[in-house]
Each structure stands twice: as structure tokens, then as C-alpha cells.
Amino acid sequence: MSLTLRYMSVPDIQQVVSIDRVAFDPPWSARSYAYEITESTYSHMMVLESIPDAERPTNPWKRLMQNLSGGGVPIDPQIVAYGGLWKVVDEAHISTVATHPDFRGRGWGEIALLGMVRKSLSLGAAYVVLEVRISNTTAQNLYLKHGFVTHGIKKRYYHNNGEDAYDMRLDLLADDARENVEQKFSDAVQRHRFADHYTTATNPAVSTVE
């Protein structure tokens, strides 16, 4: 598969909302995503897009003819992970992050997280903050792995069931922060071989307004 990390666009909304409905209760609406993409100047929404390799015939003669003709079975790109980042003053806030349920366990949600952390660095943020359910130990372990620490507890943060949330933060002003972020992102690129069109790119919504 060919993976690309890039800014979320309006045509992505249908796929993102479908994943969101499975991942979260309550999920965001399509209108909310449209606002984040097209109107908000502080939002940096991203997707990890997968383009599967074209199916290839097993018969060697047919495979040769396909190569000569440049043919193949076209396959539409699929959103396999996504996330949202808000940059306000010196804070970068990860508003959402999720992986398609069919593609969990491959490290692709980790790419989304690392991409937003590196984006925070390129935007000049002093720290990255996020909330996570107290019961979601899998996500907590991922955040701890990448340097986040628990800053406090937000009581009854989740409206659907009143569950508390951990307020977790990553200090980007620490002496070795930039080096650690860059190294972890570089390791992820090498491991997963994805193209990065997000972390240092200009926000298309802002460039359109300008």
C-alpha cells in the first residue's frame, strides 16, 4: 500500500464521518468537519490516505502484457486514519484522532499522532495538549510512549456517560524536544514509507482566504 499524510479536504468528509461514527460517541457532524476545513483559520485537520497496489494477474504472460500496456485495476484511495489539531497562541490542541476499524493495529494511528506533534512543532507551539478517557488505557500508553505526561483530570468531561478525562501534555520547549520529535517522525517514515504532505505544508484554507 502507498500511504500519504496530508491535509483533510472536503471530499474526505464522507469517509471521515463514517469512521467517526464508529470511533466516538457522540461523533462529529459533517458540518463540523466542513467548518474545520474551510472556515477555521486555527484548525489543521489531517488524514492518512492509503492507495492499495493495483491487482496483478498471476499468469506471467498476462502480467507482462499488463506491464507493457501500463494497465492495472484502478482502486480508489481510502482514509485509514485522521486527526484534528487546533493551534491557538502557544498551545496546540489535538481535538480528535482515530483509525479506521479495519486497519487498527498497523501503527497508522501512531502516524497520525506523530504527524500532528511534528505539525505543532512547525507551527511554533510551546506544548501539545489532548484529552483521553480514563478507561482508554491503550491510547494513554501510546501518548506516554511519545512523551506526553498527565497534567490533571477533567471531571465528567465526556457528556455521553459523564466519564472523566486525563489532561495530557507534551512540552515542546524542553531541551531535547525538537530532536525527539524529529527522530520519532523520521523513524515512522522509514518504517511505514509514507509521503508527508502535511507537517510542513501550508494550510490550504488559510492560503485560499489570503
Image (spheres, grey):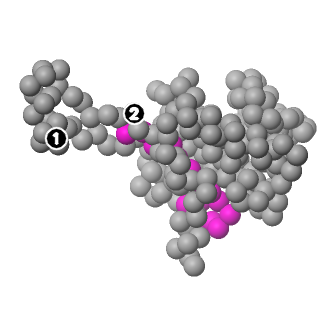
Q: At 55% from the left edge and 43% from the top edge, which residue is drawn? A: 82
Tell me, yes or no, whether the highlighted magenta stretch contains residue 18: no
The earlier-in-sequence mark between 1 and 2 is 2
Could you tell me residue 47's position as x and y percent? 52, 46
Residue 153 vertical position relative to residue 90 in the rendered view, above or below: above
Residue type pointed to by label 1 = Gly
Q: At 88% from the left edge and 46% from the top edge, which residue is drawn? A: 175
Residue 145 vs residue 192: left or right? Answer: right
Secondary structure beneath dot 1 equals loop
Tell me, yes or no, whether the highlighted magenta stretch contains residue 47: yes
* Residue closest to the eye, 119 or 105: 119
Secondary structure beneath dot 2 equals loop
* Residue closest to the eye, 89 or 98: 89
Could you tell me residue 17's position as x and y percent? 50, 45
Q: In which quadrant is the C terminus drawn?
A: bottom right
Residue 58 vs residue 170: left or right? Answer: left
Residue 135, disc? none
| Residue to which mark 1 is pinned | 71
Res 134 quadrant in image: top right
| Residue to which mark 2 is pinned | 1
Could you tell me residue 166's position as x and y percent? 83, 35
Task: Look at the image and give the residue range highlighted in magenta.
Answer: 36-51
Q: At 53% from the left edge and 39% from the top edge, which residue is drawn? A: 81
Residue type pointed to by label 2 = Met
Asked if the residue under mark 2 is in contact with the one under mark 1, i.e. CB atoms within 8 Å, the reply is no
**Crowd rating for badge 1 (residues with CA inside 10 Å; few <14, some 14–19, many 20+):** few
